[in-house]
Amino acid sequence: MASQGGNNIDQYCEQAKEFVSWYINWSYKNLNGGSGCPEMEFARIVGGYGQGATNPPIEDLQSLFGKLPGGIFAIGNEPGVDDGRTPSQYAQDYGRYYSALKAINPNFLVGTGGLIPTYSIHLAEGGTENGKTLSVKEYPFGVSGTTAPMGAGRISGQKYLEATRAAYLEIYGTEMPMDFINIHPYILLGPGTCTSCFEDSIRAWRQYMVTINMQNTPLIFTEFGVVNYFTPEKDIQEFMRRSFDFLLTARSAEYGNPQDSYRLVQRWAWFVLNDGEENFEGLWDNTALFDSDTKVIRPLGVIYRDYIESLKNRKHTYLPLIQRNN
């Protein structure tokens, strides 16, 4: 259950196959000539980024995916944040890709690109953590050492989805179909390791899903973790343990998914499996499971591996998945 750092994943297959069950790489194909890991499920991202996205072209979908027995497809990535499309533009492209993929195989599971929750945006705009007002200056956050918090001034996932759903209804004359809702529940200010903030974010999203009649819909993360690259790794390690405990056990009869024994979250992927230097310039060393140069598992990866291994020895442990679609 880990995201892959945008590189060829093949070189990690043997080491990771016992504790990584699925991966993404922000693409619809394995990269750099790789063939992927047969023991892991590949969740694809299609239709991003930008209006009229052609990644891959609609006319190529049949030849690319026609022989797959099933699969998970997220349309775009972080719409409203990384993805520059307006809700109306995204609705138009979402409808094109959703319809085309379902025409190829109705068993494909198709849903949104990873949305940034309201609570994360709230923190980025100056929320509090443990009763203390957070300051950007305390934890410089941003690409290339800037102090601008990621997400500041950008539309929250709930607002973006509301606007997209309204646009979809106007364009296509029907409700926007989603086999799952995909979010990236990062805490976007401070060290990014506030467990209670993370948990509140998930609960708030699940409660929101009830209001739009989607309580039965799976909630997944194609990314989550700690994206403040100044946070000490020991704090990330503790956040990993606590967040995993929550994701495995959190339920609510009021707003959890009744098709999954009222659990709140059905699938998640840690960011990031390996820190690809050419993509991230070494920014995410402290949150990577493997060293991208040596291919050796890092201390955080050992904790991840050992956590998953410990689940295999527990009785009646349930590891939530949407369904297997290799």
Image: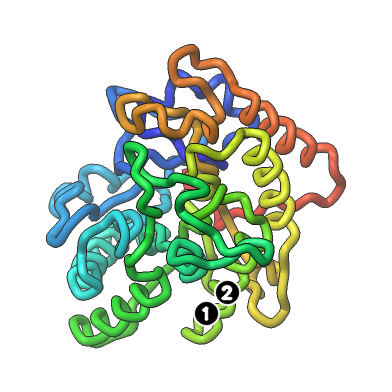
The number of numbered badges drawn on the structure is: 2
Q: Residue drawn at (29%, 54%), measured in percent from left and top?
A: 82
- Name the residue at the front extreme: 137
Number of other residues with Cα within 10 Å of mark 2, as a class: few under 14, some 14 to 19, many 20 or more: some
Q: Position of residue 128 (x, y in %)?
A: 58, 66
> What label sits on residue 204 in the rendered view?
2
Residue toward you, 314 or 143: 143
Residue bearing the label numbered 1:
208
Tag 2's secondary structure?
Answer: helix
Q: Where is residue 80 in the image (x, y as percent from the top left)?
A: 30, 64
Residue toward you, 243 or 90: 243
Q: Are marks 1 and 2 in contact (CB under 8 Å)?
A: yes
Q: Which amino acid does label 1 sit on?
A: Tyr
Q: Residue drawn at (65%, 25%), measured in percent from left and top?
A: 299
Q: Residue drawn at (72%, 50%), measured in percent from left and top?
A: 242
Spatial distance from mark 1 to mark 2, Cα to Cα?
6 Å
Q: Where is residue 276 in the image (x, y as percent from the top left)?
A: 38, 27
Q: Which amino acid does label 2 sit on?
A: Ala
Number of other residues with Cα within 10 Å of mark 1, as a class: few under 14, some 14 to 19, many 20 or more: some
Judge whether 113 appears above or below 213 on screen: above
Judge whether 79 appears above or below 253 on screen: above
Judge whether 34 appears above or below 251 on screen: above
Placement of the N terminus among the 4 image quadrants: top right
